[in-house]
Amino acid sequence: MTADLARLKTRADFVRVAAGRRRAVRPAFIVQAAPRPTKDASGTSVRVGFTASRKVGNAVVRNRAKRRLRAIAAEVLPQMGHPGTDYVLVARATASERPYAELLGDLEGALRQLARQTARDGSSERARTAAET
């Protein structure tokens, strides 16, 4: 599955994704995911945002970490990202130093973990709905 990448830019989008409570933690970053609201759903695109707090390091280190996260996202998310989903990659202190190949593997593993969480949550949601009727 190939999806177009768009960027998350507003604080409201970042907060909504963080509140979605679907996340996968890796040594160099955290991936947060949330389905896009129906009013914003374009259906075919994956949106992604990047953030690095001052805990990551000074401005040079934070920018390097975000550049590296943008590079792996551009390589992995078009194939493995779920259309209609927003992702936020939160840099951790090792993001600027971790080998690129390991970053790629980490993102692929995180996306697989998020897909399993989504499938599990979806099946439990269907079970709850069936039990209520």
Image: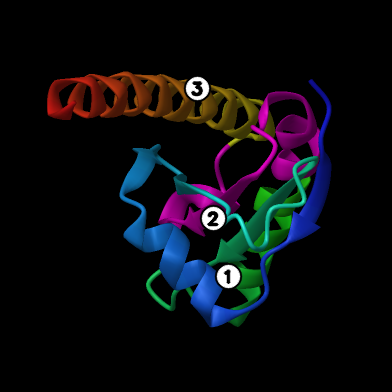
The residue wearing badge 2 is 88
Q: Quadrant of the N terminus?
A: top right
> What scheme was used to colour the molecule?
rainbow
Q: Nearer the viewer, residue 22 or 83?
A: 83
Across and down, in percent, residue 102 comes to: 58, 27
The residue wearing badge 3 is 109
Residue 77 part of the magenta-drawn span: yes
Q: Amino acid at mark 3?
A: Gly
- Measuring 41% from the left and 20% from the top, which residue is drawn there? 119
Q: Amino acid at mark 1?
A: Arg
- Measuring 39% from the left and 61% from the top, which residue is drawn there? 18
Earlier sequence position, callout 2 versus callout 3:
2
Using the image, determine if residue 105 lies above or below residue 55.
above
Across and down, in percent, residue 67 comes to: 73, 59
Using the image, determine if residue 4 lies above or below residue 81.
below
Across and down, in percent, residue 122 comes to: 36, 26
Q: How many marks?
A: 3
Mark 2 and mark 3: Cα distance apart in space: 15 Å
Q: Nearer the viewer, residue 96 or 18?
A: 18
Q: Is residue 1 left or right of residue 98?
A: right
Q: Residues within 10 Å of mark 1 (few under 14, many from 20)?
A: many
* Residue 62 seen in render: yes
The residue wearing badge 1 is 62
Q: Residues within 10 Å of mark 2 (few under 14, many from 20)?
A: many
Q: Is residue 61 left or right of residue 27?
A: right
Residue 126 part of the magenta-drawn span: no
Query: Dot 1 lies on which element?
Result: helix
Earlier sequence position, callout 2 versus callout 1:
1
Q: Amino acid at mark 2?
A: Val
Q: What range is drawn magenta here?
A: 72-98
Across and down, in percent, residue 6 comes to: 79, 56
